[in-house]
Amino acid sequence: MRIGVVTFPGSLDDRDAARAVRLAGGEAVALWHGDADLKKVDAVILPGGFSYGDYLRCGAISRFAPVMAEVVAAANGGLPVLGICNGFQILCESHLLPGALTRNEHMHFICRDQKLRIEDNTSAWTSSYDAGQEIVVPLKNGEGCFVADTAVLDELEGEGRVIARYLDVNPNGSLRDIAGIRNKRGNVVGLMPHPEHAVEELTGPTIDGLGFFTSVLTSMVNS
Amino acid sequence: MARVVVDVMLKPEILDPQGRAVQGALGRLGFTGVTDVRQGKQFVIEVEGEITDERREQLHAIAGELLCNPVIEDFILIVEEDQ
């Protein structure tokens, strides 16, 4: 199972994402923003960071990187794609997911171990979890406030497309405590917190994040 | 040559923490009577030749697809033809 991890100029968490893939039992494949080539991978991760320095808007310039045309086409064809933090912002800018991520309501960059509830375990990236399972993974963002109009929010809720919600504390003002969403088909998932930083007891607060990476490996075996 | 100015603002219903921070700072500086501050972006673009209908359409595409995110922002585009 080959999982591609895209590196943009300014990506930070590509190495951690690749390591999480390996710990979950997959083969991590480095993809480059400037190459319109997915190297025949079975899934793609858009990692966290500050691609293109967050110039213009977070993810706005990455959306037009050569690799993204391939990612968008493949995602529309069913390829599993996970966007974490900056990757989530890129997925929204690319219109693969609805809504937008805006500056944290309280203006502070926040870095904390965050409790989440997995709301939907039918996506390619959440099937290893039980619906309703509570997990703790690191969260670190300055522009993580998820917004969308009421009709879009109601549609996301009605179709079970909110995949994770913040528990105890809403760290950034996201509407309806939304931490992550998926597309209708369930192959594209965007998540603001960082499961790739919670895959080993030595370095993470938990190993709760590993499930995102084992999920996609399982879903590919089953498909 | 023509100069085109695109102003991008967050939609009224979208919270603007930066504008709110500026408003708070104004209060601390003793400026009274400021009831709201919204922060936006201005792009000044220079293009070759005259602004034809086709060029105008292209500029609207630039503004709508790259300069602003229509989910959260609106834009106003003003063409300032050069003398």
Image: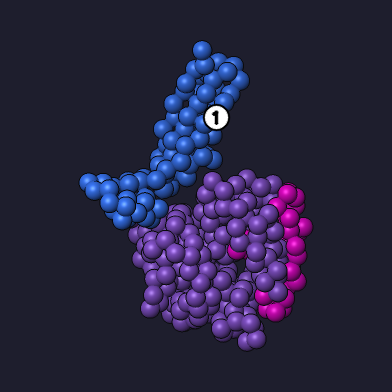
Chain colours: A purple, B blue
Residue found at the very far bottom of the displayed protein: A201
Residue B14 is left or right of residue A125, and the answer is left
The residue where tag 1 is placed is: B45
Q: Amino acid at mark 1?
A: Ile
What is the chain letter for disc 1? B
Secondary structure, mark 1, is strand
The image shows residue A9 at horizontal and vertical percentages of 68, 54
The answer to whether residue A176 is magenta is: no
Query: Residue A84's quadrant in the figure?
Result: bottom right
The answer to whether residue A42 is magenta is: yes
Reply above or below: B69 against A25: above
- The N terminus of chain B - image quarter: top right
Query: Residue A165's quadrant in the figure?
Result: bottom left
Residue found at the very far top of the displayed protein: B83
The image shows residue A28 at horizontal and vertical percentages of 74, 69
Which residue occupies 40% across, 53% down?
A: B18
Count of marks, rendered view: 1
Reply above or below: A43 against A168: above
Reply above or below: A154 against B23: below
Reply above or below: A26 against A38: below
The image shows residue A31 at horizontal and vertical percentages of 73, 58
Query: Residue A44's quadrant in the figure?
Result: bottom right
| Mark 1 neighbour class, 10 Å CA radius: few under 14, some 14 to 19, many 20 or more | few
Residue B36 is left or right of residue A169, and the answer is left
The image shows residue A144 at horizontal and vertical percentages of 47, 62
> Does the image show residue A126?
no
**Stretch in magenta:** A20-48
Which residue occupies 38% across, 68% down?
A: A177
